[in-house]
Image (cartoon, rainbow, N blue to C red):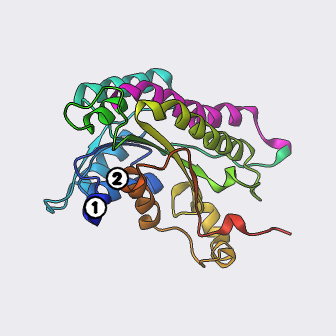
Amino acid sequence: MDIQSLFSVKDKVVLVTGGAKGVGRMISEAFIANGAKVYISSRDAAACESACAELNSTSNTNRGTAIPLPADLSSLPECQRLATDLAARESALHVLIHNSGATWGTTYDTYPDSAWSKLLTLNLQRVFTLTQLLTPLLEAAAASAKPPGADSDAPSPDPARVINIGSIDGLRVPQLPTFAYSASKAALHHLSRHLAVELGPRGITSNTLACGPFPSKMMAATLREFGEEIRAVNPLGRIGTPGDVGGACLFLASRAGAWVNGATVALDGGVSLMAKI
């Protein structure tokens, strides 16, 4: 198979939650630059509109399109509305990328109970909720990739994809006091593996990118204060770039990544391997 076909995502329908800013914006840009139709969802409707306008502003005919589909994913009714709206527009969803999330850092003695409710809901529970709601569209995408006349129960050569944006804080104990965040991401990694087993027979893969530091709003304060130290301790001597996370998602979403299921990929330059003693 030629490299253009092997890594192509052209004409695939993609939903990126938290896709208007930070890492989500990087991912959205990668898919749009390579010909996909990307629905960008976020609680901030204005940010969705602005991001889509910017991403659609180029005249390159090989690019895909960005479409705003705002929703507050911490809310069950909003998740249900998002799924209904998407189903009214599309008959299939090829790639679902769960990037929406939140963090909370404060000392152990002052860490509030409300932080657990907020982060476990958004970072973990709603990943399951939205995947469950969108499974019929994902199944339809997998079925559409089968050759004409194939048995209904035959495996799809190009499964639908669920890509979960996790964190290296879910792989090792972080130095910062972000208890609910690290716990929610560790749980997300395991949920992704559980979904891989459940959804694989339905023609849907589930994988996780355990991201290290990237330039984003969530990381802004940390990078301002500790950026040089973070770069210095990384085996590759830098932080992540848009091409790093975008490229990893393109691989998982393309034919090249069709055999990857249940994986947790540390996308961090190797920093999570470094001992702290």
Residue at disc 1, secondary structure: loop
Taking the image as shown, residue 195 lies to the left or right of residue 85, namely: right
Q: Which residue is mark 1?
A: 1
Q: Tell me residue 161's x, y (percent).
A: 41, 42
Q: Tell me residue 201's x, y (percent).
A: 46, 31
| Residue at image coords 49%, 22% | 76
| Residue at image coords 37%, 23% | 81
| Residue at image coords 68%, 53% | 169
Taking the image as shown, residue 17 lies to the left or right of residue 34, namely: right
Rounded to the nearest angstrom, the CA distance separating label 2 from label 1 is: 10 Å
Q: Which residue is mark 2?
A: 255
Which corner quadrant of the image does residue 147 belong to? top left
Q: Is residue 200 above or below residue 277?
A: above
Asked whether residue 107 appears in the rendered view, the answer is: yes
Contact flag, marks 2 and 1 (Cβ < 8 Å): yes
From which residue to which does the magenta span run?
Answer: 109-137
Disc number lying in front (2 or 1):
1
| Residue at image coords 37%, 41% | 159
Of residues 87 and 223, the one drawn nearer to the viewer in this rendering: 87
Disc 1 marks which amino acid? Met
